[in-house]
Image (tube, rainbow, N blue to C red):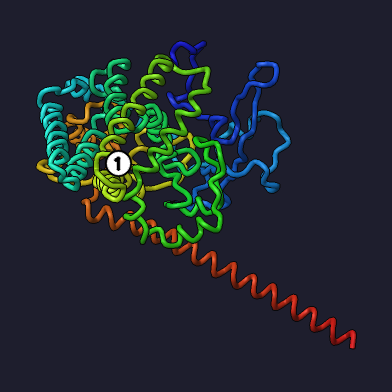
Amino acid sequence: MVKRFSIGRVQLVDDIWEPLVPPIMSGWVRKLNADGKQEWHREAAAAHSSVNTPQSPSSQILLVDRNDPSLQSQSHAPTLATLSPPPTDLSPKMQARHSKAYRELHKRITEAGLYKTPYLTGYGPEVARYLLCAAISAYAYSHNWLITSAIALGLMWHQLVFTAHDLGHMGVTHNWAIDRMLAIFIADFVGGLSIGWWVDNHNVHHLVTNHPSHDPDIEHLPFFAISPAFLTSLWSSYYKRIMHFDKFAKIVISIQHKLFYIVMAFARFNLYALSYSFLFKKAFDTKRARGGKWAFRAEICGLLVFWSWYGRVLYGCGSWQKAVVYLLISHIVPSPLHVQIVLSHFSMSTADLGPTESFPHRQMRTTTDVICSDSIAFLHGGLHLQVTHHLFPRLPRHNLRQASALVKEFAREQGLVYAEFGFVSGNKEVLGVLRGVAEQVKIVGRVAGVEAREAVEKRNAGEWSVERKGR
């Protein structure tokens, strides 16, 4: 699509592009005014790092409340200053070299035939697993073995998500319409979730991975904060709201490492809320992308069908107590999926190194693989190889293992770190990050408490002094 908007070519010096800051990264967006014309609108203020540390580099731009008096700007549109990137420690030549090598790597992967989908050997066993889980669930339900039925249904949902993921990336048939129709059937009709919401959310995640102000996949206040940056009530450019670090958030974040698995157990309910709020907004969107109208209608139909059949299943449990148990079990069983997903990012860097950073450098800095044997790879859906997936999102999932060997070679040649953790050690890393932020919340709370006491003591001392003089 970008090629259609090309009006010329930039003459580069030494083949190096000197990047500018996209307006949205400094809080500027285009909106229609009362006359129907596009005009600039400042939705957030840009806060620049005052230090230069690995966690908060000088290149970092975070978005905060536009009404923050310390960051007010008099301009009514982006200026050269807002488009000029902050200083960075990265070498433009080195980043350009990474980008060039990455394009060469992409050619090697394409020439190796790794974009060809292995339908029979890849999806054959998966479809068999889906049908087996569905059959066990239906058989157990017909014999009133409700817990067994709920577990089998949860396992089917857990496994189906991987194929819905592939279809959302156009990584199965590589045809948008066909992949989207299949994805709607799996995600909406069978799973009760919106594939349209997931694609919209996930595409942004792939573009700005682990950026506190822009990546919705790490914006989980008030339940999780994986960076101290979230303790400053950042603005989310995706959700278009301030992520308030309020009293409730302070309490939850201070014990987030203890609540991690409990919250993850009920994460699917949050996906329902995100899906349906997204579709509600889309109902009033007059500028949908290609296929947007029929896909939206198909999703609405799919969700109505899902709640019809799943509602009938719950009703048939015999009592509301049994229905609640069935509901909880079927939704908690797929919860390891959510833990698997966050392992690949929660323990990695959330720093913003600016627009100078190349795409492969950012993806390898913010993403890690989960090491596991081929025999249990199906439990991860093959998506434990997240580094390669993030470098080539449309690569068929069943070819990631072969491609990862080429990516590791690329990393060695370019001096990049290819991060890997075992499942257990990965969990420890994530819990360590959560615990670290929680401890900072407690420290900030103690400091605030001490300052408050000192202020009270000074005020009391002043009042006592005045009282003595009065006497």
Which quadrant does the N terminus fall into?
A: top left
Extreme residue in the right direction: 470
- Residue type (three-letter) at the residue carrying disc 1: Gly
- Horizontal relation, residue 281 to residue 367: left or right: right
Q: Is residue 288 above or below residue 105?
A: above
Percent position of residue 67, x then y: 68, 43
Extreme residue in the front direction: 318
- Horizontal relation, residue 381 to residue 225: left or right: left
At numbered mark 1, what does the secondary structure look like: helix, strand or loop? loop
Q: Which residue is mark 1?
A: 415
| Residues packed near mark 1 inside 10 Å, few (<14), some (14 to 19) or many (20 plus) | few
Q: Is residue 391 above or below residue 57?
A: above
Which residue does the image show at 19% across and 45% down from the upper left? 146
Does residue 97 show up?
no
Percent position of residue 320, x then y: 31, 47
* Along the line of sight, the residue nearer the viewer: 322 or 366: 322
